[in-house]
Amino acid sequence: MVLLKNGARILFKKHGLYSFQGHYVNRLNDEIRCQCQGTEQQKRTLFNFPKKDRVREYRGRQLVGHTMDQMFEVVSDVDNYHKFLPWCKKSIVRQRNTQNLKADLVIGFPPINESYTSNVTLLKPHLVKAECKDGKLFHHMLTLWRFSPGLKRELQSCVIDFQISFEFRSAFHSHLSNIFFDQVARQMESAFIQEVGRRYGPASIHPVNLLLNTSSHRT
């Protein structure tokens, strides 16, 4: 049993630490729909995909062996996203100050290759929030990173809360996101943590999935 700075307790299993797996918020409903409404699913096409199914959301929470400042520096380094994010083909910051930046990004995984503008709010070292407001590709898109203190006994650690949610305007893109979203979100989260390791050295501890340890978070 270990104690976080915020008083939360985490129970470590004897066979080792959990590898991180986030929570795909839409997954349960998708599975029920596939099992119980197979006929209806087969009748759908890319162009009549229900609008209520176009919203996708993923959430993750984990303890990592890097500091809040290290995580913040990598997540806020939008200029270099194209170098370490597998789905990002281009990332150019157009405007920047200490608390905000605006960037043009191109995302691509077959057959999607689209550009959009991201408005990013920075609160060092606690928060990075990115929103798409250009209205061409998304009805809405929000990516939110929150960083908080980790273990009392390990100064080089922090807790990451990660959330991404969006709704494509295109029914075609929505259909593809329904297929690939879970995998892309996991790869995105993992890529940031791997990049922190490349820049600042090995993690002080193995990552722990706090979503799997909700029963042991009581103060």
Image (tube, helix red, strand yellow):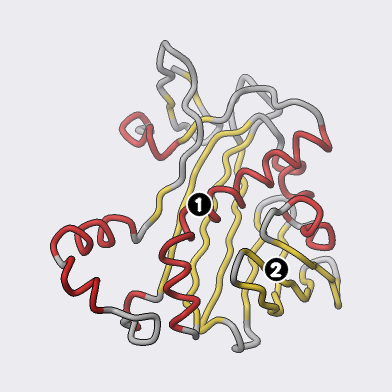
Quarter of the figure that contains the C terminus: top left
Task: Classify residue 149 by image quadrant.
Answer: top right
Asked if 192 appears above or below 153 in the picture, the reply is: below
Whole-percent x, y for residue 209 in the image: 47, 35
Task: Classify residue 71 by image quadrant.
Answer: top right
Of the image marks 1 and 2, the number of the one nearer the N terminus? 2
Asked if 4 appears above or below 116 in the picture, the reply is: above
Question: Which mark is nearer the camera, 1 or 2?
Answer: 1
* Element type at mark 1: helix
The answer to whether marks 1 and 2 mark residues whose Cβ atoms lie closer than 8 Å is no
* Residue at image coords 83%, 57%: 80
Please give the residue where the numbered disc 2 appears in the rendered image. Answer: 121
Taking the view exactly as shown, the residue that stands out farthest to the top is 14
Whole-percent x, y for residue 133 in the image: 63, 84
Task: Classify residue 158 by image quadrant.
Answer: top right
Query: How crowded is the residue under tag 1: few (<14 C-alpha within 10 Å), some, or many (20+)?
Result: few
Would residue 89 be found to the left or right of residue 57 on screen? right
Would residue 117 be found to the left or right of residue 5 on screen? right
Asked if 99 appears above or below 4 in the picture, the reply is: below
Of residues 161 and 57, the one nearer the viewer is 57
Name the residue type under label 2: Thr
Please give the residue where the numbered disc 1 appears in the rendered image. Answer: 183
Name the residue type under label 1: Gln
* Residue at image coords 46%, 54%: 182
